[in-house]
Amino acid sequence: MATILTIDDDITMQHVISMVLKREGHDVFSAASARDAMDCLARFHYDLVLVDMMLPNTNGLEIIGAIKQKWPYDTPAIIVVSALGNEKNVQDSFDMGADDFLRKPFSTSELVCRINRLLQRVTHK
């Protein structure tokens, strides 16, 4: 079981992801804005962060940068989940430190598979 933070301003997307991951046994927390995300990240350390690229007043890259700065040696795994799936967005996400990139729309089974594989890798370092 992992503790996961989802950062997405689409409440329906948050609900679906949360429901699926809770069924998998994970503890899931949600943030709809950069401010909410920073508040959550200040209070708790997460095993994995799912972050949307497009957020009100910021973007996912800025969130990734803030996470990397706050925990340079114990960074949670990061998956970008975004409709912005062009090559530049994917490359920029990896350059900032994302571990994976999943284009919207996606299947929930693919999301679960990617999360499980990533968590397996980071917990067996």
Image (cartoon, rainbow, N blue to C red):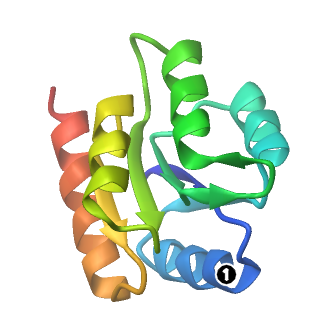
Query: Which residue is nearer to you in this view: 68 or 122?
Result: 68
| Residue 125 appears left or right of 72 | left
Above or below — where is 26 with respect to 95? below
Name the residue at 24% across, 36% down. Answer: 122
Q: Quadrant of residue 39?
A: top right
The percent position of residue 97, horizontal first and vertical second, equals: 35, 31
59 with respect to 48 (left or right): right
The picture places residue 60, in percent across and down from the top left corner, at: 56, 47
Rendered position, 116 above or below 83: above
Q: Nearer the viewer, residue 72 or 3?
A: 72
**Could you tell me which residue is drawn at 19 percent across and 48 percent down?**
120
> What is the secondary structure assignment of the residue under circle 1?
helix
Give the class, few, some or many, for how many residues have Cα within 10 Å of label 1's Cα (few <14, many ≥20). Answer: few
Q: Residue at x 77, y 61 (%)?
A: 32
> Which image quarter holds the C terminus?
top left
> Residue most toward the top?
73
Q: Amino acid at mark 1?
A: His
Q: Quadrant of residue 77?
A: top left
Residue under label 1, please give it: 15
Residue 85, image x, y percentages: 35, 68
Residue 65 horizontal/vertical position (percent): 53, 26
> Which residue is at the front of the view, 20 or 110?
110
From the viewer's perspective, is 91 left or right of 46? Answer: left
